[in-house]
């Protein structure tokens, strides 16, 4: 019973922090970023990596488009937005 109570308290503490906007725990994973790029398209992911660009941590997704071209997408880890 004590372990259950401890687990509930820890879960409550972390659940609040997961929804904070500027929390370091809230970030877009590399897998989620790749899914975001190919969702609703016929693109094929060829590779993905995380790097620092202009002081921001970004996911770089290498994609093969339906017309045979290779395109790179950069997604900000913190916001999930495309970086130009």
Image (spheres, rainbow, N blue to C red):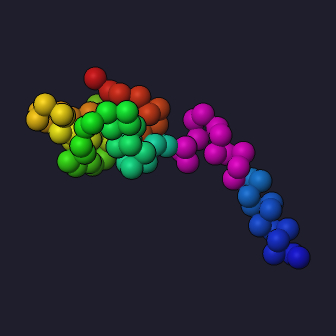
In the image, taking residue 6 as reference, residue 63 lies left or right, namely left
* The residue positioned farthest toward the left in the image shown: 68
Image coordinates of residue 4 in percent, x first then y, are 82, 71
Q: Is residue 8 magenta?
A: no
Image quadrant in which you'd find residue 54: top left
Image coordinates of residue 24 in percent, x first then y, are 54, 44
In the image, the segment drawn in magenta is 14-26
Residue pictured at 39% horizontal, 49% vertical: 31
Main SS of the magenta part reads: loop
Residue pictured at 13% horizontal, 31% vertical: 67
Instruction: Kindly tell me whether residue 75 is visible in this rendering.
Output: no
Q: Nearer the viewer, residue 34 or 41?
A: 41
In the image, taking residue 57 as reference, residue 42 lies left or right, namely left
Instruction: Kindly tell me whether residue 81 is visible in this rendering.
Output: yes
Residue pictured at 74% horizontal, 53% vertical: 13
In the image, taking residue 51 as reference, residue 20 lies left or right, namely right
Position of residue 50 relative to residue 6, above or below, is: above
In which quadrant of the rendered image does the N terminus lie?
A: bottom right
* The residue positioned farthest toward the right in the image shown: 1
Image quadrant in which you'd find residue 45: top left
Image coordinates of residue 25 in percent, x first then y, are 55, 48
């Amino acid at each position: 019973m004590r372990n259950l109570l401890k687990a509930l308290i820890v879960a409550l503490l972390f659940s609040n922090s997961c929804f904070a906007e500027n929390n370091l725990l809230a970030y877009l994973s590399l897998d989620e970023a790749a899914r975001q790029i190919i969702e609703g398209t016929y693109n094929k992911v060829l590779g993905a990596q995380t790097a620092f660009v202009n002081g921001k941590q970004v996911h770089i997704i290498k994609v093969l488009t339906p017309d045979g071209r290779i395109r790179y997408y950069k997604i900000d880890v913190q916001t999930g937005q495309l970086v130009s």
